[in-house]
Image (cartoon, helix red, strand yellow):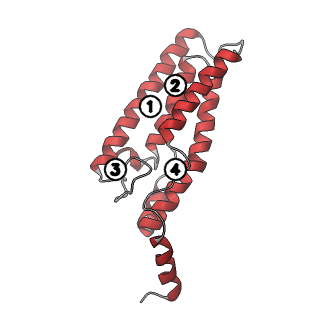
């Protein structure tokens, strides 16, 4: 038997869109932050390199490769699990396989890693700083809204997933 409060709550959800309603499109934000990082690097160069050139080149490129592999793995797993990737579309499943078994947000983790990797590769603290900005903006403007949407849509199933899987790592 459903009580009156639960019935009212169900009707409140009927008026909400069937998507997360994020504050911005994550790939667009990634592009803006990359441009900002390179722009700051050109306008206000920092005099001391972060790492010796060889280490920066090898280390940064390795992180970039790992970021791309993680993003591709996560996207394929999401599609195979029947969930949508674009934040403005409804999702019909909680995916917990593959990279979603150790991170609830492996695609966003890959985006932040990409900025870190490019920052190390370019020997730029500005780009690494943009990775921090990206993580903060993703947490506030995307992840928190996606989590509210998924909790509203999937209830206890999503709550159980959040209890066993970390947000980032």
Query: Which sits earlier in the primary sequence, circle 2 or circle 3?
Result: 3
Q: Quadrant of the N terminus?
A: bottom left
Determine if residue 112 is in view. no
Circle 2 residue: 117
Q: CA distance from mark 4 to mark 2?
A: 21 Å
> Percent x, y for residue 158?
44, 62
Query: Which sits earlier in the primary sequence, circle 4 or circle 2?
Result: 2
Q: Are marks 1 and 2 in contact (CB under 8 Å)?
A: yes
Tag 4's secondary structure? Answer: loop
Tag 1's secondary structure? Answer: helix
Q: CA distance from mark 3 to mark 1?
A: 18 Å
Nearer the observer: mark 2 or 3; the answer is 2
Specify the farthest residue to the left: 80
Circle 3 residue: 97
Number of other residues with Cα within 10 Å of mark 3, as a class: few under 14, some 14 to 19, many 20 or more: few
Tag 3's secondary structure? Answer: loop
Specify the farthest residue to the top: 53
Circle 1 residue: 67
């Amino acid at each position: 038997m459903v009580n009156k409060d639960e019935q009212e709550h169900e009707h409140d959800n009927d008026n909400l869109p069937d998507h997360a309603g994020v504050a911005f499109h994550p790939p667009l934000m990634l592009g803006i932050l990359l441009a900002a990082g390179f722009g700051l690097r050109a306008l206000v160069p920092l005099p001391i390199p972060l790492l010796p050139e060889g280490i920066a080149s090898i280390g940064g490129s390795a992180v970039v490769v790992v970021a791309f592999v993680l993003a591709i793995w996560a996207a394929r797993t999401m599609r195979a699990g029947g969930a949508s990737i674009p934040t403005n579309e409804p999702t019909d499943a909680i995916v917990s396989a593959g990279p979603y078994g150790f991170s609830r947000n492996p695609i966003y983790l890959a985006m932040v890693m990409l900025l870190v990797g490019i920052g190390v590769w370019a020997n730029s603290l500005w780009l690494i700083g943009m990775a921090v900005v990206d993580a903060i903006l993703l947490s506030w403007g995307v992840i928190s809204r996606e989590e509210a949407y998924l909790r509203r849509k999937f209830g206890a199933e999503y709550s159980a997933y959040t209890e066993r899987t970390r947000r980032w790592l």
